[in-house]
Image: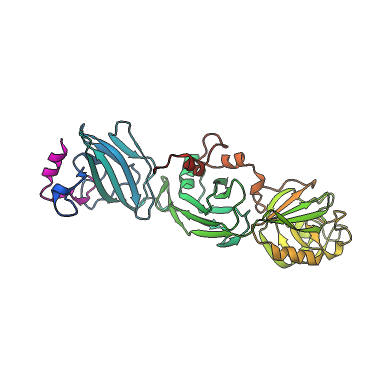
Amino acid sequence: MSHSSRTSRVAGCTLVVIALGVGVTACGSDGNPLSATPYDAAEQISFNGPTKAGQKADPDKPLEITVEGDEGRITDVTATDAVGRHVSGELSADGGRWHSTSPLAADAHYTVRVSTEDEDGAPGRRVVTFDTGKPRAKQRLNVTFGPQAGKYGVGQPVTADLSQPVKDKAQRAIVERGLKVVSSPVVDGSWHWVDDKKLHYRPKEYWPTNATIQVLSNLDGIKINDRLWGGTAKPLKLTTGDRIIAVADASSHHMTVYKNDKEINTIPITMGKPGFETRNGIKVVIGKEYFVRMRGTTVGIAAGTSESYDLPVYYATRVTWSGEYVHAAPWSVGDQGSANVSHGCIGMRTSNAAWFYETVRPGDIVKVVNSSGHTMEPFGNGFGDWNVDWAKWRKGSALVTGDPEGPTEVERARLRPQSV
C-alpha cells in the first residue's frame, strides 16, 4: 500500500481505535490531512491487549507490537510510563515484531511511540496510550535506603533494606534493575547482595570529593514474583566532602591522616595488644560520640579479672559495631607511639583525639595496617565493604553473568557510539 493511499484514506480526520482501546486522531496538526507526515500507521501495526476502550492491560503479559501482513516494517519503539520509566524490548531482524523484555508496572499509565516504514520506505508513526491493572498480589516489596540524607566521607556505601526476602537470582535481577544510583561526577559502581533482604552499593574506587549521589527506586508496581510486587521507596540524596583517609600502623604506632591525598597530621597511637589485636583493613567511620562509658563486659571480658575495665572515654569516633573506636586514652600516653596496650581500640592523647573527632565525619576512612588481628568483616560489623576486591564485589550483583572484571553499565554506555 502506498503512502498516498494511506493519506487519502484518513482525509475525514476520524478517530481510530486500536486493540488497546486508545483513540488517536489521524489528521495533521494543522487540520489538513494531506500535510500529515509521516503517515498514520494505525492500520499497519497491531498491539496485544484489551479489545475495548476502558479495559486495562494485564501487567503480567509482555507488550507486543506486530506488522499486519507484509506491508513494511517497524523501525523503532519506545514505551514509557507516567513517571518516566522505560520499557526495554527487542525488535526482530525483519522488523515484523517488537516485544517487551522488562516487566510492565501494575496500575500505571503508558505511552508507546512506534515508528514504521511502508514498502516504499515512507515513514509512519503511531502513538498510543494504555493503562495497566492493579496487582493481584497482597505483598509489596518496599525499600528503605540508607544512610540518612546528608554529607558523608568518600567511603560511605549506600544501603537498601527490603521489606521481604528475595532469594531467586532472576527475581533479584528485577529488584536490582529497579534500584538506581546516580552520581555527579559519574562513577562506575555496583550493588552487592549482602543477604536476602539487604544490598550495599559502592563505586569501584572511593566516591569523588564534593559529589552528589541520588538514590531512588523504580520498583513501584513492578512484578517480582506471583505473590510479590514492587512497593514504595523514599528517594535519598547524599553528598561527599573532602577525601579524608587515616592510616593507622600497628608496627610504627602512628596514625597518618591525609586530606585530599595530602598529609595533614601524624599522631602517636596505641592499638590492640596480643589477644586483643585491632582488626586489619579498611573501616568506615559510622558515628561519633563525645562521651562513652566503656566496660570490658560488653566485649566478653569478665568483671573482676585482670583485663576488666570500666572507663569514661571522650572524643570517641566509632568504626565497628563491636566496639572499636578511635578515642582519647590519657591513661596510655606513655605507650603511645611505642607499644600496643589497648583492648582493640586506637588510643591517643586527648588533644589529638579531639582534633581527629572534629576533622572526620561518618563515611571517612580509617585503614589499619600491620596488625596481627583478623581482617575487618565485609558486612555486619560496620562497613567493611572496601575489603572486598572489585571482581568479587561485582559477583555479588544479580546482573553480572559474565566476566566480573568486565565493563559495568556505566562503562558500556561510554563505549556505545554516540550520534552527532
Counting every numbered tag in the picture gives 0
Q: Residue at x 55, y 36 (%)?
A: 406
Q: Which residues are magenta?
A: 1-25
Looking at the image, can residue 208 be seen?
A: yes
Q: Is residue 29 left or right of residue 114?
A: left
Q: Is residue 262 left or right of residue 178?
A: right
The C terminus sits in image quarter: top left
Q: Residue at x 23, y 42 (%)?
A: 124
Foreground residue among 289 and 297: 289
Q: Is residue 61 above or below residue 336?
A: above
Residue 240 coordinates in the image, percent (x, y): 59, 58
Residue 324 coordinates in the image, percent (x, y): 74, 56
Look at the image and name its color scheme: rainbow
Hey, which quadrant is residue 100 in on the image?
Answer: top left
Foreground residue among 284 and 183: 183
Foreground residue among 72 and 224: 72
Residue 96 coordinates in the image, percent (x, y): 27, 34
Q: Is residue 236 magenta?
A: no
Residue 87 coordinates in the image, percent (x, y): 37, 45
The N terminus sits in image quarter: top left
Q: Is residue 10 magenta?
A: yes
Foreground residue among 138 and 416: 416
Looking at the image, can residue 296 be seen?
A: no
Q: Residue at x 57, y 41 (%)?
A: 394
- Identity of the residue furthest to the front in this view: 420
